[in-house]
Image (cartoon, grey):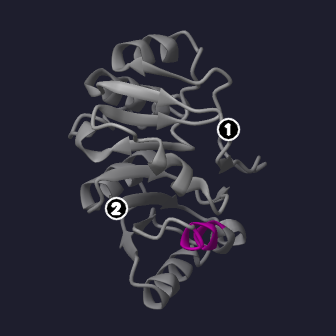
Amino acid sequence: EKISIIIPVYNVKKYLNKCINSVLNQTYKNIEIILVDDKSTDNSDKICDKYAKLDSRVRVFHKENGGGTSARRLGVEESKGECISFVDSDDNLFPQTLSILIKNITSDDIDIIVSDIKDESIISGYEFVKYSLQWCVQASIWGRLYRKELFDNTSFDVSRKLIVGEDLFMNLRVGLKARFVKCISESVYNYYKNPNSIT
């Protein structure tokens, strides 16, 4: 199965090369990388274009500034993979990340893989929603794999005024459509605490 890795990009030239290289160097090779430039003003857009020329797996979309959620929406709309994974442009992946995630889709009715969970289990989509609301499962979207069929035109419908928490709304919407969610203990995402980030 092809995995579409969606990376919103906005003024992150200091981190962007490391992020993109970490995805290009995955041991799992059946991927496409979708870079969505959200009207960067620091030449991040040119870095995106450079990678698109270097590797045919990289596709770039330039859009008017609308925030990370709108960038992810465009990325999903343009994706060609059966599975979706999100990466923030100042973070990076371990080389085995996508191999670990994809190997855990062990049956057709597992729709989401959630990593870095102490107690491994398979739960229903409804339980995933319940645990997300109770903060038993983090509301983030990183280090996860989603089947593309879970997304529709309402998946990213949140107000631009919402600075934090938009990930929770997306997870609730796709969770309600998911059959089963597999929680695994492996840590697969290298999150960078960027002092300039919203969070």
Going by the numbered disc 2, the residue's amino acid type is Lys
> What secondary structure characterizes most of the magenta part?
helix
Going by the numbered disc 1, the residue's amino acid type is Thr
The residue closer to the viewer here, 77 or 41, is: 77
In the displayed structure, does residue 79 sit left or right of residue 14?
A: left
Percent across and percent down for residue 128 are 44, 19
Q: Quadrant of the N terminus?
A: bottom left
Query: Local crowd at mark 2 within 10 Å, few (<14), some, or many (≥20)?
Result: some
Please name which of the two marks, 1 or 2, marks the residue nearer to the observer: 2
**Disc 2 on helix, strand or loop?**
loop
Labels 1 and 2: the sequence-earlier one: 2
Residue on which the image places disc 1: 199
Which dot marks residue 2? 2
Q: Quadrant of the C terminus?
A: top right
Query: Could you say which quadrant of the image residue 137 lies in?
Result: top right
In the displayed structure, does residue 132 sit left or right of residue 70?
A: right
Q: Is residue 60 above or below residue 125?
A: below
In the image, the segment drawn in magenta is 19-26
Name the residue rendered at 55%, 34% in the picture.
140
Examine the rendering and report whether any part of residue 144 can be seen: yes
